[in-house]
Amino acid sequence: MLTEIRSLNEECGVFGIWGHENATQISYYGLHALQHRGQEGAGIVATDGKALKALKGEGLVNEVFTQEKLGEMHGHAAIGHVRYATAGGSGIENVQPLLFNSTTGSLAISHNGNLVNATELKGHLERQGSIFQTTSDTEVLAHLIKRSGYETFEEKAKNALSLLKGAFACAILTEEAMYVALDPNGLRPFSLGRLGDAWVVASETCAFDIVGAEFVRSIEPGEFVIINKDGVRAERFAYPEERSICTMEYVYFSRPDSDIDGINVHSARKRLGIQLAKEFPIEADVVTGVPDSSISAAIGYSEASGIPYELGLIKNRYVGRTFIQPSQDLREQGVKMKLSPVRQVVKGKRVIMVDDSIVRGTTSRHIVNLLKEAGATEVHVVISSPPIKSPCFYGIDISTSGELIAANNTIEEMREIIGADSLSFLSVDGMVQNIGRTDPGSKCGHCLACFTGEYPTNIFPTTVLPHEKETVR
């Protein structure tokens, strides 16, 4: 996935393990499998039952962790995190897991998603005397837990989670237990696995495959799972609401070898490509996909259309992160460094270029130009999702409609901007039906907000907040 240059980024990935003597090392491999979900920072917090110890930094997983440092992190349990900065911005202080120490016990939190009522909750807590050390909305949860009027940690955590609005898949670690929770709409994927006698949780099942764990089940919306020396126990902090998993997890974010609620991501993307060929048959000589997330859809389009699939674009996997370049010219040069056309494949050919989405349009324009400079006579762009017209408030870094090309232009205007000979987008119904979810309702358990502008939660909620030293029960 070209996350750095395509400007569509998932917030982060979460990993956790309880009951294994090599918990820290396994967390490292788990985070490595989730690296595509965030490249700005990584961290691990481990416990030996007596204390929590953190190791984190800015950069990629293999940049932050060394064998020497990991060897100093002893413990039977750990939670980890890879981050792409959206809410709260960048900076080492915002790299998770966030660790909090107090006289009544320590806790660490890893969070995937975005809270739509974080500002409201933070203002309430500050008026009560809380002092925040980060700009991350994740810190709000720690303060809510510590200020809760309930007696046990489990009750405090469930009470705090019930006040959160938006998208959150959380792993919370203390000296005694690991706690796992998913928001009532299930906006983010989260799974539970087993590694021998140890329990594992991860944002994607591909992390289980890497560490040798067996998938057990998905974490349910509104569920609160307690994992400790006594095993696993599932409770609820909220009643589940209409399932609304982020559709872009299937279209773009997740690794092809991951399964989300029993649906393989590669297979879902291939079906989207097949549907694209049905909705938009095009006369051409070759089909190619933009690496990596669009390859599966391109294969599907090729099979359904009978037009041969070829590697028309090659990704250079040894180029650094180009999103940090300070000027647009340098960022555009980064596109050429990241992608190279295969001239002998596209020269003199009518090319169908399959991509998963168009956000701002700049990268699509550059890729079309690359293909035409390599000799393609025509470039037809087909997108395996509908136009992205609305901002996301649940953890993807598209916060305003002004930055979205589809929100401000017709499809024909977009075609002209990117320089394609034709431009086609998959229909909403075609996308939903071919992903393959069986949840009841017309949306089949999907969040379609960025395509339709219909949000599964109130994005400007009024939260029922506890008075000082009181607890909502």
Image: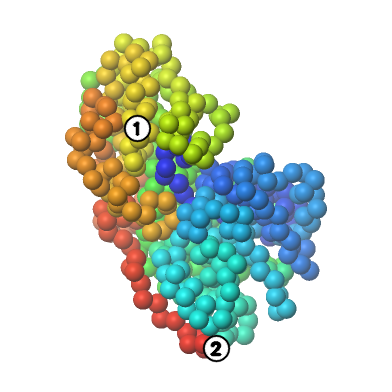
Residue 273 location, x and y as percent?
33, 34
Tell me the kind of residue under disc 1. Answer: Ser
Horizontally, residue 35 falls left or right of residue 71, namely left
Specify whether residue 356 is in view: yes
Q: Is residue 282 above or below residue 38?
A: above
Q: Is residue 168 above or below residue 431?
A: below
The crowd level at tag 1 (other Cα within 10 Å; few <14, some 14-19, many 20+) is many
Mark 1 and mark 2 lie on one chain; the one further toward the N terminus is: 1
**Disc 1 to disc 2, C-alpha distance:** 53 Å
Q: Which residue is mark 2?
A: 469
Q: Are marks 1 and 2 in contact (CB under 8 Å)?
A: no
Q: Secondary structure at mark 2?
A: loop
Q: Which residue is mark 1?
A: 364
Residue 115 location, x and y as percent?
45, 65
Q: Nearer the viewer, residue 48 or 271?
A: 48
Q: Secondary structure at mark 1?
A: helix
Specify whether residue 194 is in view: no
Q: Residue at x 50, y 44 (%)?
A: 258
Q: Nearer the viewer, residue 11 or 22?
A: 11
Q: Quadrant of residue 312?
A: top left
Q: Quadrant of residue 461?
A: bottom left
Residue 77 location, x and y as percent?
71, 60
Tell me the kind of residue under disc 2. Answer: Lys
**Tag shown at residue 432:** none
Q: Residue at x 53, y 26 (%)?
A: 316
Q: Is residue 216 above or below residue 101?
A: above
Q: Residue at x 54, y 37 (%)?
A: 321
